[in-house]
């Protein structure tokens, strides 16, 4: 199965700890997107990355949140000093190069459910 | 600012019924529109993608239509089955951007 892989599926952290969420895109996809789904709300765009570049982080909270997509390895969404309000499902999606395949659907992973105690 | 609304928020129907889910968006300058299915505790499964130049797409018992000028899309499910029970999400890709703007979904329950 060459779909988007996210891990861990569930993550529990205490307030003040750090959370690291990992996403491996579909093989051959160079574009990664992170979305957050708060309880009873729709998915909200957070950040768009290509290999080694952040293209758009307009949906990221200004503090404590960061994302990377290194040349080798998965994309990482990092949340420092977590608070209760960070509890949510975090989804990663990937797609081929947009300019060549603009109407290709984004492929989503199963998400990481983050719970803050 | 693009806003996507889905009506109804929840729907419960007996097995075998044909049903329609609605999605409306405020800015008609979309690049495409995608319908997803989300099962509890799971990720999103893409059902249908309609390009801005298209009017409809079909896959099996599913048919999605798009009326860009009026800012509406519908997802038609024929002969519904209990296995169709899930949350259905509509998302629009804005212009030439790469971001999807999602609606809050319709929770569908098909009763056996």
Image: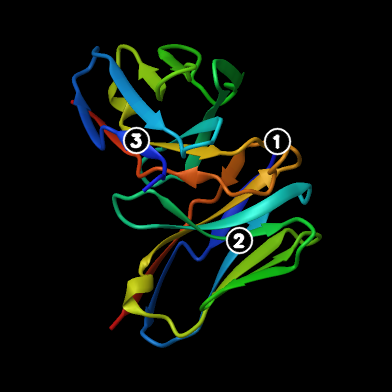
Q: Chain of mark 3?
A: A
Mark 3 vs mark 2: same chain? no
Q: Chain of mark 2?
A: B
Decide which of tag 2 and tag 1 comes sooner along the chain: 2
Instruction: Kindly identify which residue carries mark 2.
Output: B23
Q: Residue at x 74, y 48 (%)?
A: B30
- Could you say whether the residue bearing mark 3 is in a helix, strand or loop? strand
Visible residue check, residue A104: yes
Contact between marks 3 and 2 (CB within 8 A): the answer is: no
Question: Could you tell whether B9 is left or right of B74 in the image?
Answer: left
The Cα–Cα distance between marks 1 and 3, rounded to whole angstroms, is 24 Å
Q: Which mark is residue A6?
A: 3
Contact between marks 2 and 1 (CB within 8 A): the answer is: no
Count of labels in the image: 3
The Cα–Cα distance between marks 2 and 1, rounded to whole angstroms, is 20 Å
Q: Residue at x 40, y 21 (%)?
A: A73
Circle 3 crowding by C-alpha within 10 Å: few under 14, some 14–19, many from 20: many
Q: Nearer the viewer, residue A117 or A3?
A: A3
Circle 2 crowding by C-alpha within 10 Å: few under 14, some 14–19, many from 20: many
Q: Where the C terminus of chain B falls, by quadrant? A: bottom left
Q: Where the N terminus of chain B falls, by quadrant? A: top right
- Could you say whether the residue bearing mark 2 is in a helix, strand or loop? strand
What color scheme is it?
rainbow
Pair 2/1: label in front: 1
Q: Residue at x 30, y 55 (%)?
A: B40
Q: Nearer the viewer, residue B63 or B19?
A: B63
Visible residue check, residue B26: no
Q: x and y percent of residue B80 in the render?
A: 42, 81
Instruction: Kindly identify which residue carries mark 1.
Output: B97
């Amino acid at each position: 199965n060459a779909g988007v892989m996210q891990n861990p599926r569930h993550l529990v952290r205490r307030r003040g700890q750090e959370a690291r969420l990992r996403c491996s895109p579909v093989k051959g996809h160079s574009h990664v997107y992170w979305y957050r789904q708060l309880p009873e709300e729709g998915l909200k765009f957070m950040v768009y990355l290509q290999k080694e570049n952040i293209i758009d982080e307009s949906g990221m909270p200004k503090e404590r949140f960061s994302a990377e997509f290194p040349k080798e390895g998965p994309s990482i969404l990092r949340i420092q000093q977590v608070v209760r309000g960070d509890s949510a499902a975090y989804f990663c999606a990937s797609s081929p190069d947009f300019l060549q395949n603009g109407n290709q659907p984004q492929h989503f992973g199963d998400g990481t459910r983050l719970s803050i105690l | 600012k693009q806003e996507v609304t889905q009506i109804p928020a929840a729907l419960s129907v007996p097995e075998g019924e044909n049903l329609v889910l609605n999605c409306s968006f405020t800015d008609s300058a979309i690049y495409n529109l995608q319908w997803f299915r989300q099962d509890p505790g799971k990720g999103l499964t893409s059902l249908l993608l309609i390009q801005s130049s298209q009017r409809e797409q079909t896959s099996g018992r599913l048919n999605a239509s798009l009326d860009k000028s009026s800012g509406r899309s519908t997802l038609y499910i024929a002969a519904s089955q209990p296995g169709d029970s899930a949350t259905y999400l509509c998302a629009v890709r804005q212009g030439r951007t790469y971001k999807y703007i999602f609606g809050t979904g319709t929770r569908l329950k098909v009763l056996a």
